[in-house]
Amino acid sequence: MRERRHRQRRRLQKKGTSAARRVLRRLSGREHRMMTDLNHQISKFVVREAERTGRGIALEDLQGIRGRVRAHRLQRRTLHTWAFAQQITFTRYKAACAGVAFVLIDPAYTSQACPECGCVSRANRPARGRFVCTGCGLAGHADHIAARNIATRGIAGWAAINQPHATGLPSPRRDRESKPPASTGGS
């Protein structure tokens, strides 16, 4: 969708007529609104699926990725128009509303580390989409291996978040859940 909008903008800007400028003004916010809606739909689906399965959500913290990653010239537009911060924001607040655990994971070495033996090496990635561990020989698709690493780090993150309070003081939430609801009927 973004590629089609880009071609359309390029064609209209090249034309340069007043009618073309008028169409560009009309289309200016449409792509942004469509991508915002798409991010809402994706985050709603992810949170609903996590709620249905009783699991949490772990996402990579991609802040600063535009400065860290070197992309080919043809991939730069794709990288720089990706609204990952908006996606994280939408998923975070929807997870909080649904009571689903949400944690951001440090993305360092998630695609180079073996989830079985813990071996971290650039040599584990012989090709762009392949992962072959130099330590234990585990092989698979690189994205699947990275997702396993993110899930493992997410579980460790939730364990740290869900530690009980050392004070032993009662929690207002726990008190609210343990009390029976007040009757609203009159007699």
Image: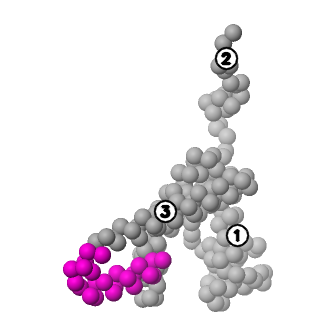
Indicate the position of residue 13 as horizontal and vertical percent values.
28, 84
Question: What amino acid is labelled 2 in the image?
Answer: Gly
Residue shown at 65%/73% (left/top)?
146
Q: Nearer the viewer, residue 97 or 150?
A: 97
Indicate the position of residue 52 as horizontal and vertical percent values.
72, 53
Q: Are marks 2 and 3 in contact (CB under 8 Å)?
A: no
Which callout, 1 or 2, points at the residue further toward the start of the chain? 1
Residue shown at 43%/74% (left/top)?
81
Q: Is residue 8 left or right of residue 158?
A: left
Question: What amino acid is labelled 1 in the image?
Answer: Arg
Rendered image: mark on residue 148: 1
For mark 2, does the 10 Å Cα neighbourhood hold few (<14), some (14 to 19), or many (20 or more) residues? few
Identify the image quadrant of residue 92: bottom right
**Residue 162 against residue 62 in the figure, above or below:** above
Residue furthest top as drawn: 187
For mark 3, does the 10 Å Cα neighbourhood hold few (<14), some (14 to 19), or many (20 or more) residues? few
Distance from disc 3 to disc 1, alpha carbons, whole Å, reads 28 Å
Distance from disc 2 to disc 3, alpha carbons, whole Å, reads 43 Å
Q: Are marks 3 and 1 in contact (CB under 8 Å)?
A: no
Q: Nearer the viewer, residue 108 or 171?
A: 171
The residue tagged 2 is 185
Question: What amino acid is labelled 3 in the image?
Answer: Asp
Q: How is the image coloured?
A: one colour
Residue shown at 71%/24% (left/top)?
180
Mostly what secondary structure, the magenta segment? Answer: helix
| SS state under label 2 | loop
Q: Is residue 79 magenta?
A: no
Q: Nearer the viewer, residue 80 or 5?
A: 5
Rendered image: mark on residue 37: 3
Segment colored magenta: 1-24
For mark 1, does the 10 Å Cα neighbourhood hold few (<14), some (14 to 19), or many (20 or more) residues? some
